[in-house]
Image (cartoon, rainbow, N blue to C red):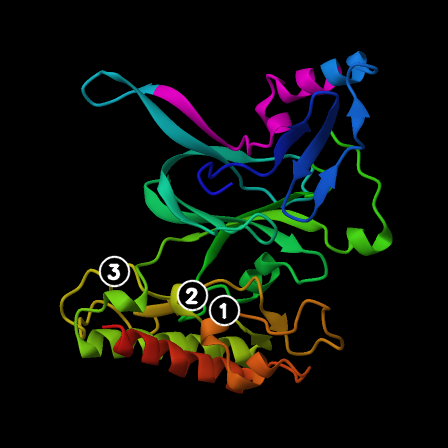
Amino acid sequence: FYEQKNRDFLHAVLITQTDVQLFHFNRSLLVHSSRFNYHHNPETFVRMVLGMLSPDESHLGFDMSIFRMTEKNTAGESVRVQKMKLILSEPNAEIKIWQVVNVNGNRWRTKEIRGRATTCWSITQNGLRRLVKKLWRIQGRDEEWSFFKAVKDMKGVAQMYCYEEGGTALTHASLVKGIFTEGELQFDRIWCCVTFEEYGPTLESFQSVLHLLYAFLDAVNGHWNLWNIGILHRDISLNNVLFGREYAKTIDPLDPKIKEGYRGVIIDLDLAIWISRTESNRNDVRTGTKIFQSIKVLLGRGWPHDFLDDLESFCLLLAWVLLTY
């Protein structure tokens, strides 16, 4: 799952001298077939093998929106390049509008099987650098794109360009037909994809004290801007506070060409909430990245996560950068 960045699920077989059992690993649950004797049921065994040899790679667990093709480079040589198919239209639009873009590389991939499995790709779209984030959102959480729609042109907060949603982990193509209880279906996850502007590195890459503090200040103000429209971030951490793309390149921390609000940004709203909500999600206990969680959140006694917890996370983030320098 980690090395194959475009893998969504995986089939595996447990086989003995007499029996065989098929397993389906996905981002929600482990699903498996009943164990059967393949000497007594050779047709079922052959069907299983043929299924695992399908020429359609989407049936083998791969995200087919990422692919390779042959192109001519500037020297006229044929080279293999990686591409991505981006859906630009709204998820429920009758007519789908899509674009094929160049993939510059993989920026981030979480090391997990069951979970969000966040994967970030650097792409070039219309001559500009973008970041495509793909993940599996647990059912019951608000859509990340719904928050980003509300923060258009907001200073100190990442900006979204397009988004799409797909099927769920348990309804993805599988050779194992699962029979799930209502409790198991609650763990199902929804595939989603959001495209942002590609920002700079984390705050550990600062070039001077002022360079660090101005970016940090803009990110804190970005959090304040979110709070003022009723959004609480809840996952302030090292990888979620970045330098602005141009500010990361400048040597002068007071560069007049880079305005306040564009020196540092907060990203990742997939754990955010609307402050006006009236009930909690069952997955809300200890929300966030553990090493940057507030003491109150770490105690996990059911107290609601509020802006003071996020501000404590900002303090822990700054301490991390200073103590590991």
**Mark toward the start of the polypeptide (3 vs 2):** 2
The answer to whether residue 129 is above or below residue 68 is below
Residue wearing tag 2: 240
Q: Secondary structure at mark 2?
A: helix
Closest to the camera, between mark 1 and mark 2, is: 1
Distance from disc 1 to disc 2, alpha carbons, whole Å, reads 10 Å
Q: Are marks 3 and 1 in contact (CB under 8 Å)?
A: no
Residue wearing tag 3: 246
| Residue 109 seen in render | yes
Closest to the camera, between mark 3 and mark 1, is: 1
**Mark toward the start of the polypeptide (3 vs 1):** 3
Q: How many numbered dots are placed on residues in this image?
A: 3
Q: Are marks 1 and 2 in contact (CB under 8 Å)?
A: yes
Coordinates of residue 256 in the picture (x, y in percent): 19, 72
**Does the magenta portion include 52?**
yes
In the image, what residue type sits under mark 1?
Thr
Q: Are marks 3 and 2 in contact (CB under 8 Å)?
A: no
Taking depth in this image into account, of 244 and 259 the one nearest to the observer is 244
Q: Sort mark 3 into few (<14), some (14-19) or many (20+) by Cα contacts within 10 Å.
A: few
Work out which residue is located at the far front of the displayed protein and give it.
17
Taking depth in this image into account, of 103 and 11 the one nearest to the observer is 11
Taking depth in this image into account, of 201 and 32 the one nearest to the observer is 32
Residue wearing tag 1: 289
Q: Secondary structure at mark 3?
A: loop
Q: Secondary structure at mark 1?
A: loop
Q: Is residue 282 left or right of residue 181?
A: left
